[in-house]
Image: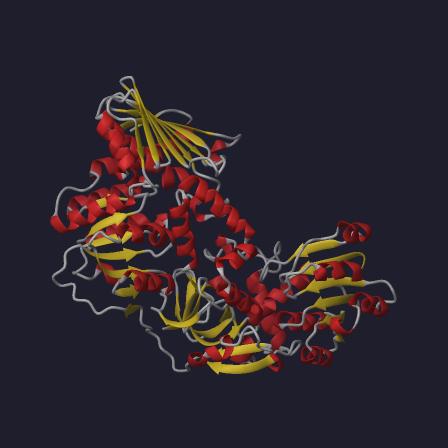
Amino acid sequence: MKQIIQSFKTGETILEDVPAPQVKRGSVLIQTTRSLVSLGTERMLVEFGKSNLIQKARQQPDKVKQVLDKIKTEGLVPTLEAVFNKLGEPLPLGYCNVGRVIAVGEGVNDFKVGDRVASNGHHAEFVSIPKNLVAHIPSNVSDDEATFTVIGSIGLQGIRLLNPTLGETVVVVGLGLIGLITAQLLVANGCRVIGSDIDESKLAMAAEWGVIPFNPIKGDIVKFVEDQTNGVGADGVIITASAKNNEIISQAAKMSRKRGRIVLVGVIGLDISRADFYEKELSFQVSCSYGPGRYDEDYEQKGIDYPLPFVRWTEKRNFETILQAISSQRIRVDEMITEIVDLPDYLKIYGQIGSSSSIASILKYKEETELNPKRNIELLNVDFSSSKGVIGIIGAGNFTKMTVMPALKNSGAHYKYIASNGGVTGTSLAQKYGIANSTTDYKTILNDSEVDLVLITTRHNLHASMVIETLRSGKNVFVEKPLALNLDELNEIIEVQKQTRKNVTVGFNRRFSPHIQKIKQIVGDSPMNVIATMNAGAIPPNIWVHDMKVGGGRIIGEACHYIDLITYLTGSKVKAVCMNAMGINPEENTDNASILLKFENGSTGVINYFANGSKSYSKERVEVFSQERTIIMDNFRVTEGFGTRGFSKLKTKLDKGHTNQFLALIDRVKNGGAPLISMEDLVNTTEASFAAIESLKENKWIEL
């Protein structure tokens, strides 16, 4: 299928050929007929992409600070590699999509094949959208008109926050697409509306709808509003403009009445004068996109609706409101359509997006229905029939892009497939690393007899089921940690591995680092005490890693790395685990915890997993005490020995062992041999991570 993407690195806008997405549980698959170009938002993205590195840095000072912190802990070269990889990401454009449902996912009951719907899908021939971001289109609303649904909801949410009443005077600053819809909705709500913009054609259009127009170039907007309100000032101001200076927010405050309300929908400078707001006791609020539910994974991705009696207006209900307003002609959107362009001619819009005077530009897609879109595209015609070490990769997220692919670069592996949900990231990585096929159907990989090894780098909740499917398909499997999220999953993996006798490898890369290898060489298998500290850094609570059903939490999902590492160093298995966590209710927060490990050979381990430390301090540190020797490894860059005859220091660039791990893995797949890590060790480490959580709940040592 064709999809419009943009490069953050160059600013180039491309019509890319990518595999169509599959319909997922809780979603509908839509064949697009129209999509609306958000000229304001998309122009900003294109212009940002075209700016140089210094200009990009100036626009995102918070990101610059993150880069500087990363340089301190990981070094300059790895940080620059990460930055350039990030800039190289393709960005799917568009969020105003209209089409027809061609497939319905499990758990969706309110849509059927053939329904006309509006959604926040990208500019793509096919999109798979969760049900709470899709709305039915009334029969008397055309596809062209329905493309205004999502962008109209942005303006509607700003109005809901302002909460205007009949007869109030509201100023709309910026009569672009969102501003014009906002002004119409306010007029329909019984408000007296003043519209401010420098474009006379937009002012004339707004005037036809009953808006009082004003061009700020021709006079003082503050005095104009005072004159229109008999010196009282505006009851409310909705800012839908885009500007970098602070003049708009200052004027908004000055034109407001005492105790007036200001809502920001657009993007402007926000250096607020306290005096302007203090004297009038003004309220100021920033509106978040389409409404309640936005960026809430439970609502958007899992389909869990907010109960209507308590949250009357959600983003989906806002979509439906806009569609009803168009249907009843309370707002007129067809008059704002400047041009309708066939998808292949997209550059007629994007080629001049920075200077375009268009209000609404619509992309038109082919009309014929296609119920079975292509889910695999071949980028390279390669014969793999005589190759060994043929790889299929499932997952094209940050870990694959930033870690796996660079580590595999010189491994001698042959890449046949990469699978991704939407097809865009997988296709981008396939083009960069010479992967023959990009697919959105991972079962294509499992069904291909030429594939020897499957790499799984998906979200944690998919690991176990995909490992089991891969083993049953007769292939070796590498899965990024964790192996499983519970004992039932783990036991099924054990059983299937016994049946198939295929190798399972978990991405416990740290044991392959030259620093850990050196420590192991020095201490051997003698009893030891190991203290490992992970200065993991805080992750916002809404990130999926914290969800025990999806990510398993940070102990099962991340700290398992160090259970494996200490197991490797001691040469022994964990026999008992005890974990304590910080806080009044520690079970609710395992981000800051200490795990105590007892090993069968008498060794002990302590894992301090903390998320409340400074990012400028080393992220990882290991201290080993054994036979009057102490060895300290700092962040996989420096290892020092004390009392270690013949060894004092090892210094390298940041090396967590990923490259060594994959070199060894590909060699085993090509030439045979025992697994890199024994199945017994993988099971023991996974059980120990489960035991840590059980220990916290039971407040006691857990024997394995």
Q: Residue lying furthest top in this view?
A: 628
33 vs 173: above or below = below
Going 70% across and 74% down the picture, which residue do you hit?
198
Query: Is residue 637 toward the left or the right of residue 331 in the image?
Result: left
Quadrant in the picture for the N terminus: bottom left
Q: Residue 237's x, y, as percent?
A: 73, 63
Looking at this view, is 678 or 304 the one in front? Answer: 678
**One can see residue 62 in this view:** yes
Q: Quadrant of residue 153?
A: bottom right
Q: Residue 322's x, y, as percent?
A: 60, 70
Looking at this view, is 460 or 107 the one in front? Answer: 460
Q: Residue 681's x, y, as percent?
A: 23, 35
Quadrant in the picture for the C terminus: top left
Q: Residue 329's x, y, as percent?
A: 64, 79
398 vs 218: above or below = above
Query: Is residue 157 toward the left or the right of residue 665 in the image?
Result: right
